Amino acid sequence: MRIIKATLEHLDLLTPLFVKYREFYGELSFPESSRKFLETRLRRDESVIYLAVPDGSEDRILGFCQLYPSYSSLSLKRVWILNDIYVAEDARRQLVADHLLKTAKKMARDTQAVRMRVSTSANNDVAQKTYESIGFREDHEFKNYTLPIASD
């Protein structure tokens, strides 16, 4: 398996997996909107998306992760938000997530980031164990809140 950085040429292969990721978290599929969302992120260089592909081929995606840049005012440094990570059902238990996370961690180091942040469902034990296995720690210093913004 190889990890590559996604480009616009990967949209047709990436979109169905992104749709499955959204469905995993209980969202409606919206394939056209999902494709447009990914296309916009890539065109505007607003995120970094890594793809796990089989050795010798880029006609199938085993998994992906998407990171968004942010910044820490306290440390005066970059922070990367690991917003999305998903592994195709038939590629699970092949360490795909581990390879994606290690690549993301290297990119964070290479860009002099102070940290990466990730959130997952409280009951997603598999993801929590995977994150902890590469060095993520549960934050006990700060309590996180969200403010839903309804559109009118």
Image (spheres, rainbow, N blue to C red):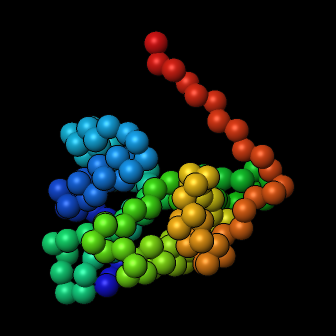
Q: In which quarter of the image is the N terminus?
A: bottom left
Q: Which of 150 and 107 is in front in this view?
A: 150
Q: Percent x, y for residue 150?
A: 51, 20
Residue shown at 61%/78% (left/top)? 133
Question: Where is 15 relative to 56, above or below?
Answer: above
Q: Percent x, y for residue 39?
A: 28, 48
Q: Is residue 27 rendered to the left or right of residue 142? A: left
Q: In the picture, residue 31 is in which quadrant?
A: top left
Q: Nearer the viewer, residue 59 or 48?
A: 59
Residue shown at 39%/51% (left/top)? 24
Q: Is residue 136 rendered to the left or right of residue 68? A: right
- Residue 63 visible in this rendered orientation of the protein: yes
Residue shown at 33%/83% (left/top)? 2
Q: Percent x, y for residue 148?
A: 58, 28
Q: Is residue 65 rendered to the left or right of residue 135? A: left
Question: Where is 122 relative to 144, above or below?
Answer: below
